[in-house]
Amino acid sequence: MNDHGADLLVRAAAVHTLVPGQEPQRALAVRGDRIAAVSSDPQGLDGWVTARTRVLDLPGATVLPAFDDTHTHLVFAGHSAHFVPVHQARTLAEFLDLIRQRAATTPEGEWIRTTTNWQELHLAERRMPTAAELDRATDRHPVLVKRGGHNDVVNSYALRLAGITEDTPVPVGGVIGRDADGRLNGRLIDNALGLVERHVPAQNRAQRIDGLRLASGRYAATGIGTVRDCAVSLDDYAALLAAREAGALHTRVRALVSALGLSSTAQVEDLLDAMEDWRYGADPGLRVWGVKFGLDGGLEAGATEEPYACDHTFSGTLIWEPDALAEAVEAVVRRGWRVGTHAYGDRAVRILLDVYERVLRNHPGLPAGTLVMEHGGLAGPEQRARAVALGVPVTIQQPLLHDTADVEREFWGPERVAALFPARGWLDQGALVAAGSDYPVGRFGAMRSVWGMTTRQTVIGVQGPEHSVTYGEALALHTTQAARLLGEEHLRGTLTPGRLADLTIWDQDPARCPGEALRDLNPTHTLLGGRLVHGPEPTA
């Protein structure tokens, strides 16, 4: 008998604590925001039940820790929660018609923006729209079509507002697109994005909060309890704080403040000055994790050792010179912050490890996990071994590969696509590796990612099956290993007394769920700190 009782009691077929060697438990008690006890007997914690205890009695259910998505973009999802849902289109005609419909109900001169989680090769025409086509959808509104985090397409109205002409200088590390005749086609890539995006009015605070409410709820509904958002501006973080205060966040958030678009250490120092107020925030629901840099481009511009399959004169784009990046990273670690750096192609992986090695040499004694590689897409055995020797963790994103394999095959060819995100090699070589989605480039979802890592299935079939991992390993990359990478293994990742009561409940055991049924499996309940963020309320 427990004199103080529990706030919540869960009875289930199996409570997988993820403690090595521990058999599945059958009951779990929560007091406050922490796990108070577990028992192998489904009635073993009945003595914790009081008049206030809520009970979830689910004899067929499986309980797992809530999942982490260690590289995603919740802010993008929140921004686009109310935007034109072009990800639903299957042809350019449908794509443009969705924009045309929104234009019909939008006051002239106001910006029209689209969702970002779509791929042009999933359209029948297998290409992006052009400025001229967007003009035909509307020439009375500026239009910003964003795909992922590296690509925009805008109409002529938006180009005029931004003052972009045929003579506009191309920013270093960016691309201003042109058609075969050399005329502007509305395409902007990487460091050219800001030419237009700086002219787009910010959403008001109420819109931002509501978008984050909707988006974080959608993550929670797939079993994700913590997101590591890898591109958060200063204004974005203020919106996250407001959403947290309003009770609108349904996931925990670990924010990487974005240094994307910055090109000097002086600019990074200014960013760090602005971050000082957030240094000591101890809110378990929202905190700054560190600073995000980008070394190379995305799908179309990842820096590779060998030329692209589609263009033998092109090997991707480096956004920073190595010496300048090293200096900027050192400015961050001197302030006591951590760093995550986007390195996608194998050349970028090699150069990033050179940069990190220099930083570690100049700053001996940095805490483990201070320097993280984001993606490490084409990391081969030699570079994986270097990362392990340097103590550099990596985040990988199988959903990104699943959704973009067709696009990437066009640029890199089939052999390099099959080699992307070599989870098996990372684990076998002893790396600290954790998993995520890279939404909006990949679709988020706890079991969608697990299914992808175990099958290596993509939109063009299985790619690189030798890089697959087991169900248990994939689970760990979203739970125990993810908590280690974030430095929170003492708080989360296992279902043990004293840790936060971040749980997911499934109406069947995911380990026994076959094939594509696992891909689409979502939990019946997701709880954070014992608080229900998805699913029906338990009884009292």
Image (spheres, grey):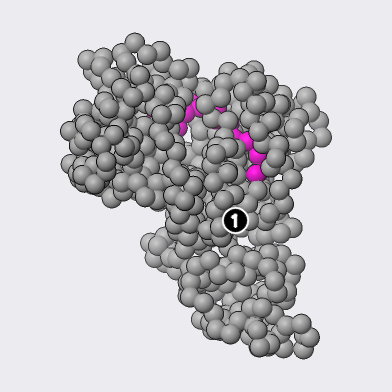
Q: Determine the image quadrant of residue 517.
A: bottom left
Q: Is residue 125 above or below residue 437?
A: above
Three-letter amino acid code of the residue under disc 1: Glu
Q: Residue at x 34, y 19 (%)?
A: 164
| 127 w.r.t. 21: above or below | above
Quadrant holding the N terminus: bottom right
Residue at image coords 24%, 42%: 103
**Label 1 Cα neighbours within 10 Å, binned few <14 / some 14-19 / many ≥20:** few
Whether residue 32 sits left or right of residue 296 in the image: it is: right
Which residue occupies 45% across, 68% down?
513
Q: Residue tagged by mark 1?
A: 245
- 264 and 301: which one is in front? 264
- In magenta, the rendered stretch is 288-303
In the rendered image, residue 294 lying in the magenta stretch gets the answer yes
Q: Nearer the viewer, residue 82 or 170?
A: 82
Q: Is residue 176 visible?
A: yes
- Does residue 143 show up magenta in the picture? no
Q: Secondary structure at mark 1?
A: helix
Residue 424: x and y, percent?
56, 47
Residue 502: % across, % down: 62, 65
Q: Residue at x 44, y 49 (%)?
A: 207
Quadrant of the image containing the C terminus: bottom right
Query: How far from the left and from the top, in percent, is residue 141?
Result: 27, 34
Residue 303 versus residue 172 in the image, above or below: below
In this picture, residue 253 sits left or right of residue 369: left
State whether residue 385 appears in this view.
no
